[in-house]
Amino acid sequence: MTTLSSCTKAEIHRNCRLFVGPLSSTALVFACNHSSRSQTALTRLRQPVRRTRLTSTYTGALAANSTSIVETACASPYRDSLATGLALVAAVIWVKIFEHLAQKGILEQKLSRKLVHISSGPLFVLTWPLFSADPSARLFATLIPVLNALRLLLVGSGVVQDVATVKSVSRQGDRQELLRGPLYYCLVLIAGTLLYWRESPVGILALALMCGGDGLADVVGRQFGTARLPFNPDKSWAGSLAMLLGGAACAYALVSIFCSLGYIPCSSSRLLRTICITALMATFTEALPINQKLDDNISVPGIAVLTATLLLRQGL
Ligand SMILES: Nc1ccn([C@@H]2O[C@H](COP(=O)(O)OP(=O)(O)OP(=O)(O)O)[C@@H](O)[C@H]2O)c(=O)n1
Ligand SMILES: C/C(=C\CO)CCC[C@H](C)CCC[C@H](C)CCCC(C)C
């Protein structure tokens, strides 16, 4: 179990800059999530954080208001349970928001479904630093997609009636659809968490390309996809370009956050090359006329894992 005092002042500053405002307490949880350092160093580091008059108001308020709550949460033996509970509540609220927007007609059903697709995975990945360094932490985190997968199984198979969920994550309101794309999506989140967790960029890359990449291809393709691909008239240049850029940007943002938090050792030129080549391969796979046989939520992360694993064989 690590505590807040295991962060360097620089780490706290860096993370505070990343997660400002209402997420300030999260920032400090993030900041205290690194592998432990020597107690002497901790004591030394702790004081400067307190002593320094942090110039901006938010950092001052942040330190004053959040430290005790965050210290307690970090030091708590229930840290992973707390993080799981928090992420589960966030997941329910997040999907409910889109259910509500689709039901009120504020968002078209297809768009609402795609926005859930684009945002849920990256938001889930962003909850990972809330968990402790304990080897069992990834199992706690896995509970979030596992419970969502179970919900999809129960609703999709008709055991539980939930019209709102069906509406928000299906294309046409057919409950059985939940057993395909959305269920595969949760299974990929489960596999990514269990196999790669926050120690390797491979899982994060695969999830980013499935969510940010493939999701954006649909949104942009529907809107601007007049020029069709020569080898697949169901897909467009605009959709594929959006997947390439959106997927690479999402992957870069997430991996950079995990690099800067110290979970992944990174050399930026190598990382950029890996992200670009993996995004290209995933975009090409998504554009192929194979999605009647193989769901994009399987083919895209599948090819991303293969490509990134091969490229990162020599390490970052
Ligand atoms: N590279 C891409 C990908 C998708 N699209 C457009 O986005 C919409 C949805 O595509 P796709 O995701 O392949 O369709 P579905 O399988 O129906 O949707 P889902 O992935 O959500 O199951 C289609 O209008 C398609 O033309 C596109 O123009 N270019
Ligand atoms: C419509 C979807 C895929 C079709 O291609 C996505 C379905 C998403 C699930 C129903 C909800 C998944 C929730 C995540 C496991 C956790 C999100 C946590 C976060 C903190 C909001």
Image (cartoon, grey):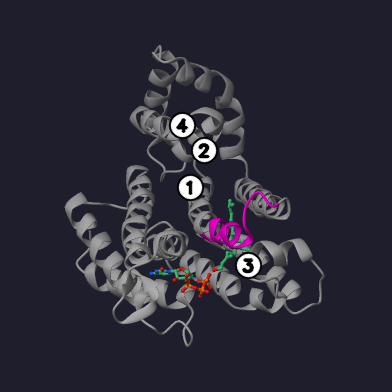
Discs 1/4, front: 1
Select label 4 or label 3 by which is in front.
3
Residue closer to the observer: 202 or 235: 235
Distance from Cα at disc 4 to Cα at disc 3: 33 Å
Percent x, y of residue 28: 49, 33
User: In the image, which disc is placed on residue 146?
Assistant: 3
Find residue 129 and name its label: 1
Q: Of residues 61 and 114, which is closer to you in this image?
A: 114
Label 4 secondary element: helix
Circle on res. 29: 2
Under mark 1, the amino acid is Pro
Asked if 134 appears above or below 304 in the picture, the reply is: above
Sequence-wise, the earlier of marks 3 and 1 is 1
For marks 3 and 2, the one nearer the N-term is 2
Vertical arrangement, residue 98 with respect to residue 313, above or below: above
Q: Earlier in the sequence, mark 4 or mark 3?
A: 4
Tell whether circle 4 marks a residue whose Cβ is less than 8 angstroms from ligand 2: no
- Left or right, 150 with respect to 181, comes to right
Dot 4 crowding, Cα within 10 Å, few <14, some 14–19, many 20+: many
Alpha carbon separation for disc pair 1 and 4: 16 Å
Q: Give the magenta range.
A: 105-117
- Residue 169, horizontal then vertical, whole percent: 64, 65
Label 3: few (<14), some (14–19) or many (≥20) C-alpha neighbours in 10 Å: some
Q: Secondary structure at mark 3?
A: helix
Q: Indicate yes or no whether the magenta region holds residue 237.
A: no
